[in-house]
Amino acid sequence: MQTSALPDLAHTDTRPMHWLATAAAMAAVVAGAGLLQPDSSASASTPHRTAAEQQHVDQAVAPDPAEAAFPLDCGNAGNTVAKQAPGDLDGDGRPETVAVVHCAAGSGTPPSGVYVLTQADGAAPRIVATLVDPAQLLTVGDFAVRDRVISATLLGYSSSSVPSCCPDQQEKVTWQWRNGAFVRAGDKAGSAGTGV
């Protein structure tokens, strides 16, 4: 019988205790890694606030568009808040609400207005910016507020002969608060501009 030139590999003869110890060690490593993960809600761009500032932000509530008066001429039909999204758009620690509002029409596609609302303590919500005026005859498709940026898809018409049910123009736009105003950027699509 020929003997191996390699040293005896006694650890290759495993027993149930060996596997149990290995499994326990692996579970400890996985559990430790889970405890050391960074907070998923934090990011490098998250401003550091004092405890008093954070308490103020936590207590702040975004304005409710149902309590706001919108400058729409809807007659007896009233208006409808079709979409809304809160967000601290100007970074002051108090959330605003962006609301997409149109007349409550029984049929058809009424034009939308896009408004930014703010609210002082105890006061009714008030409009601080009109991003889309209903007089522009646009409706709003996709809509979101993320990372202090408002994004929307505006749908419009290339001419008055296009049926109101079927807008043939589309523009993806964003607004962001810069230097005391909402700055708009967009990409037009379709055969002609929407005149926004």
Image (cartoon, grey):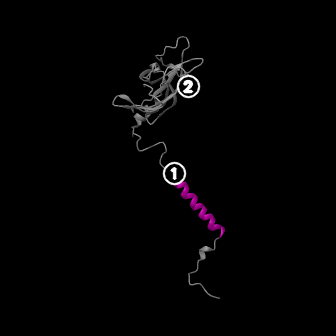
Asked if residue 4 shows in the view, the reply is: yes
Q: Quadrant of residue 176?
A: top left
Residue 4 percent location from the top left of the image: 59, 84
> Is residue 175 inside the magenta stretch?
no
Q: Residues within 10 Å of mark 1 (few under 14, many from 20)?
A: few
* 30 inside magenta stretch: yes
For the point 57% across and 17% down, the residue is 105
Residue sitting farthest toward the top: 76
Crowding at label 2, few (<14), some or many (≥20) Cα neighbours within 10 Å? few
Secondary element at tag 2:
loop
The three-letter code of the residue at mark 2 reads Cys
Looking at the rendering, the stretch of residues picked out in magenta corresponds to: 15-33
Quadrant in which the N terminus appears: bottom right
Viewer-side residue, 4 vs 101:
101
Q: Looking at the image, is mark 2 or mark 1 earlier in the sequence?
A: 1
Q: Determine which residue is flagged by label 2.
A: 166
Disc nearest the viewer among 2 and 1: 2
Of 123 and 84, the residue lying toward us: 84
Say which of 118 and 80 sits in front.
80
Quarter of the image for residue 94 reads top left
What mark, if any, has residue 35 been given in the picture? 1
**Quarter of the figure that contains the C terminus:** top left
Judge whether residue 64 can be spotted in this image: no
Residue located 55% across and 56% down the image:
30
Residue 73 on image: x %, y %: 49, 13
- Residue 179 drawn at (x, y percent): 33, 31
Q: Residue at x 43, y 21 (%)?
A: 127
**Residue occupying the far left of the picture:** 179
Per the rendering, the mark at residue 99 is none
Question: Where does the image place residue 71, in percent across and percent down from the top left?
Answer: 46, 16
State the SS at label 1. Answer: helix
Q: Amino acid at mark 1?
A: Leu
